[in-house]
Amino acid sequence: MKLLFFLFALILQDQGKPPEKAAPYYPTPQVVVDRMLKLGELKKGEKVYDLGSGDGRIVVAAAQKFGATAVGVEFDKSLVAQSRQRLLSLNLGKLASIIEGDIFEQNYADADLITVYLLPITNIRLSPVLEKTIKKGVRIVCHDFEFTEWNPEKTEVMEDTEGRSHTLFFYRR
Ligand SMILES: C[S@@+](CC[C@H](N)C(=O)[O-])C[C@H]1O[C@@H](n2cnc3c(N)ncnc32)[C@H](O)[C@@H]1O
């Protein structure tokens, strides 16, 4: 009986845990967003997830410019509200959506492409989580910080409109 109570308390405690901040909010410049989606070979009708979607700019571009079904995952309530408002005002509600939640707790089984702009330490934790749910052949594009356990199929260095350098890594799992 004591053991049951202990297990129940553990489950409750785990459910109440707030998501761990995997990276601060730092938006990808628009020109880099467009390049990430192109490098990721995104096609009309495919499904793309942006992990830690910020103001939703990757989700917006994927739906608006590529005709993809785009899902952002974001835990910051104000960024979630801001990006949902943007999707609404651009009339993208049918193609694009934002999940308010933890990137480590989602299922990415239906993803064709996943975009990531997080931290190196986060990517180390994230790769085994992704490996558990992604389907074979899924494409992943990272901005600036790579997945050190995986070999990129392509790496690109580009400049944004202010002359800052960005590195993009393309993986096919
Ligand atoms: C570097 S920003 C990237 C924003 C956007 N993807 C872009 O490229 O413009 C990282 C984002 O991840 C979000 N984030 C951090 N930890 C998270 C977590 N555990 N679950 C969901 N979102 C998270 C932050 O709030 C932030 O918006």
Image (cartoon, rainbow, N blue to C red):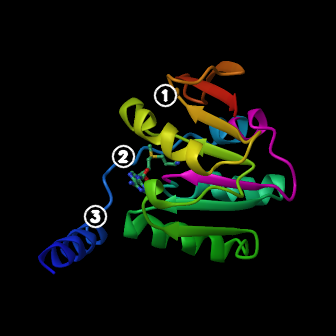
Earlier along the polypeptide chain: callout 2 or callout 1? Answer: 2
Earlier along the polypeptide chain: callout 3 or callout 1? Answer: 3
Residue at image mark 3: 18
> Residue 56 at x, y = what percent?
57, 58
Residue at image mark 1: 145
Amino acid type for the residue under numbered disc 3: Pro
Q: How many marks?
A: 3
Question: Mark 3 near ligand 1 (CB under 8 Å)?
Answer: no
* Cβ atoms at labels 3 and 1 below 8 Å apart: no
Q: Which mark is residue 22?
A: 2
Disc 3 from disc 1: Cα separation: 24 Å
> Residue 103 at x, y = what percent?
47, 55
Near mark 2 (Cα within 10 A), the count class, few <14, some 14-19 or many ≥20, is many
Point 56% across, 22% down: residue: 163
Q: Is residue 36 above or below residue 48?
A: above
Q: Which residues are magenta?
A: 36-52
Q: Within the image, what quadrant is residue 70 found in?
A: bottom right
Q: Is residue 71 left or right of residue 45?
A: left
Point 23% across, 71% down: residue: 7
> Between residues 65 and 153, which one lies in front from this camera angle?
153
